[in-house]
Amino acid sequence: MGIYMIGKLNHVAIAVPDLSAAAEQYRTTLGAKVGDPVDEKDHGVTVVFIELPNTKIELLHPLGSNSPIQGFLDKNPNGGIHHICYEVADIKKARDQLLSFGARVLGELEPKIGAHGKPVIFLHPKDFNGTLIELEEI
Ligand code: CO
């Protein structure tokens, strides 16, 4: 059996302290195609999606009191890259291979439905050069 490979970069998620200022900066200063803010209550974030020719950027801002990105913003008050997301065709196959190499999945091992309605898992940043990695089944 061959090595199971990741696919395209699906998105880069950036936590921002001021969502409207960040969206406006991408729209004007960078000239990007910027969507309207979307509240994702189940995930505790408000997201602005930015479409680039080859990938997406997601600006994340905390929503509600238990937001998973509040702690990140507390540590990084100016904002910062929160995670990057790679596409995989079979998330359980990818997960099993990662586990066999000793990589750690955050939370439960079973994939959860992520912000785009597709199964996702997150990998421990300490196992990947300090980068939180999301795998999304496409
Ligand atoms: Co994501």
Image (cartoon, grey):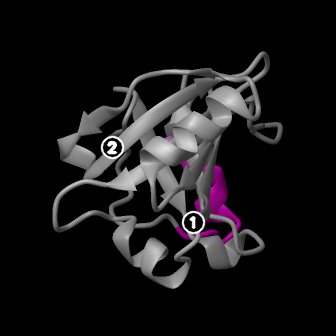
Query: Label 1, on which residue?
Result: 79
What residue appears at the point 25 percent right and 53 percent down from the top-left corner? Answer: 44
**Residue 132 location (% of width, % of height):** 60, 63
Above or below, comparing residue 52 to residue 107 in the picture: above
Amino acid type indicated by mark 2: Thr
Q: Contact, CB < 8 Å: mark 1 with mark 2? A: no
What residue appears at the point 56 percent right and 46 percent down from the top-left corner? Answer: 22
**Residue 122 location (% of width, % of height):** 50, 56
Drawn side of residue 57 relative to residue 71, left or right? right
Name the image quarter holding residue 29: top right
Drawn side of residue 5 relative to residue 126, left or right? right
Amino acid type indicated by mark 1: Gly
Above or below, comparing residue 53 to residue 97 in the picture: above
Instruction: Please state the extent of the stretch shown in magenta in the rendering.
Output: 95-104
Q: Residues within 10 Å of mark 1 (few under 14, many from 20)?
A: some
Q: How crowded is mark 2: few (under 14 residues within 10 Å), some or many (20 or more)?
A: many
Drawn side of residue 33 relative to residue 46, left or right? right
**Residue 4 location (% of width, % of height):** 75, 38
Residue 53 or residue 126, whichever sits in front: 53
Q: Secondary structure under badge 1?
A: loop
Q: Residue 46 carries which label?
A: 2
Q: Which mark is residue 127?
A: none
Above or below, comparing residue 132 to residue 24 in the picture: below
Can residue 99 be found in the magenta stretch?
A: yes
Q: Secondary structure under badge 2?
A: strand
What residue appears at the point 39 percent right and 53 percent down from the top-left corner? Answer: 61
Q: The N terminus appears in which quarter of the rendering?
A: top right
